[in-house]
Image (cartoon, helix red, strand yellow):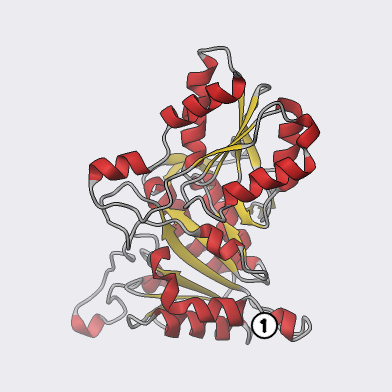
């Protein structure tokens, strides 16, 4: 198993395969459950009824997004637990199991459902280690889905990672591809604190090279996916690739934009961002979460506080409007940040 102290654009040397992001998540779960018998996973439909061979069920879809496919067959229904439709119950159960010696993973099907289990995260997972003076560890991971663009309406399309970043005691990561998904998930499961793992639905089918061996990426660290000198673009999850697309368009106009993939939303790698801003003198954050009290507003505030003398233009953002995600596909397309909006905002900063 390799631990990478940096998060490069390309995978490390060694045998790699081209995997979808959903496949990389699935592989990370399987490999870690084989390595560590204390790892368990629970959630709605993650086994899909498999484990009940007496009913003729011998296979499973693997959850709503196929990320848990094959787990029930290999690890059985004592480690892969299909739960009732009660997020408060199974998230609380997973947190309790984590505090008593297990490494527990719970799958919250959509981040929009956070309201029904928020107390378990806010007052138990985030605070137990602190309140017990470090005598209790809570190695708990919550997998959940973010992202709009699929006509799924307001209750299945939000991002909301900024809500969790506001809570001391919780860590949060937003992988941007299959490579970062596997490395960050393995690191999250092995961490002794609760970690929220945000999976963007729009990245599941994207592919890249992923090492076959087990490896971890450090929590709380960003990476630069495109070096540049004129402008710093910061992307989160899928918005990283919107920023890359915009940077390629800007390059045609002679503007050399650097693109940072934030990866972690708690803690945030401010040093990585500010080091870039001090070189490029401009900052633009691309964020799919709602704009008020958001990750993008916090990064811009930090840049203004700690790199003000280096700035040649105001720290800026491209975000959705402060509204629920619309069901209308025409309105949803307008709602989401896109490369055109990023390019237009960048032009104004350069001017």
Residue at the left extreme of this rendering: 56
Above or below: residue 281 compared with residue 250: below
Rendering coords of residue 317 (x, y %): 55, 39
Image: 22 above or below 209: below
Residue 103 in view: no
Query: Callout 1: few (<14), some (14-19), or many (20+) C-alpha neighbours within 10 Å?
Result: many
Across and down, in percent, residue 170 comes to: 63, 68
Height in image: 162 above or below 210?
below
Q: Give the residue displayed 66% in from the left and 79% down from the top.
A: 127
Near-viewer residue (98 or 334): 334
Tell me: residue 98, above or below residue 261.
below
User: Residue 151, percent across and down?
Assistant: 25, 51
Q: Residue at x 33, y 39 (%)?
A: 334
Q: Nearer the viewer, residue 283 or 98?
A: 283
Residue picked out by circle 1: 128
Q: How many marks?
A: 1
Q: Quadrant of the N terminus?
A: bottom right
Q: Is residue 173 left or right of residue 330?
A: right
In the image: residue 68, left or right of residue 300: left
Mark 1 element type: helix
Residue 84 appears in view: yes
> Measuring 56% from the left and 86% from the top, which residue is drawn there?
96
Q: Is residue 87 left or right of residue 85?
A: right
Residue 240, horizontal then vertical, whole percent: 52, 39
Q: Nearer the viewer, residue 155 or 5?
A: 155
């Amino acid at each position: 198993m390799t631990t990478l102290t940096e998060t490069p654009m390309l995978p490390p040397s060694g045998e790699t395969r081209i995997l979808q992001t959903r496949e990389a998540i699935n592989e990370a779960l399987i490999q870690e459950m084989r390595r560590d018998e204390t790892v368990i996973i629970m959630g709605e439909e993650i086994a899909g009824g498999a484990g009940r061979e007496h009913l003729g069920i011998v296979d499973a879809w693997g959850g709503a997004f196929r990320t848990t496919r094959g787990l029930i067959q290999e690890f059985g229904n004592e480690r892969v637990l299909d739960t009732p439709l009660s997020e408060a119950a199974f998230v609380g159960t997973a947190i309790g199991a984590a505090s008593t010696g297990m490494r527990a993973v719970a799958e919250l099907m959509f981040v929009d459902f956070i309201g029904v289990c928020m107390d378990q995260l806010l007052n138990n997972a985030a605070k137990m280690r602190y309140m017990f003076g470090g005598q209790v560890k809570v190695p708990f991971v919550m997998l959940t889905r973010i992202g709009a663009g699929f006509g799924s309406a307001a209750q299945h399309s939000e991002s909301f990672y900024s809500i969790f970043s506001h809570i001391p005691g919780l860590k949060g990561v937003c992988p941007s591809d299959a490579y970062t998904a596997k490395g960050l998930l393995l690191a999250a499961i092995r961490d002794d604190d609760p970690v929220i793992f945000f999976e963007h639905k729009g990245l599941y089918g994207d592919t890249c090279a992923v090492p076959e061996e087990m490896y971890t990426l450090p929590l709380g660290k960003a990476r630069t996916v495109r070096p540049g000198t004129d402008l710093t673009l910061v992307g989160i999850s899928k918005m990283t690739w919107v920023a890359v697309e915009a940077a390629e368009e800007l390059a045609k106009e002679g503007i050399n934009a650097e693109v940072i993939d934030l990866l972690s939303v708690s803690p945030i790698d401010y040093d990585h961002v500010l080091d870039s801003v001090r070189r490029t003198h401009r900052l633009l954050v691309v964020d799919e979460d709602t704009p008020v009290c958001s990750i993008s507003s916090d990064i811009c505030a930090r840049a203004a506080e700690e790199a003000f003398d280096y700035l040649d233009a105001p720290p800026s953002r491209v975000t959705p409007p402060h509204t629920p995600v619309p069901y209308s596909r025409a309105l949803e397309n307008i709602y989401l940040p896109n490369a055109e909006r990023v390019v237009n905002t960048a032009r104004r900063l350069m001017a």
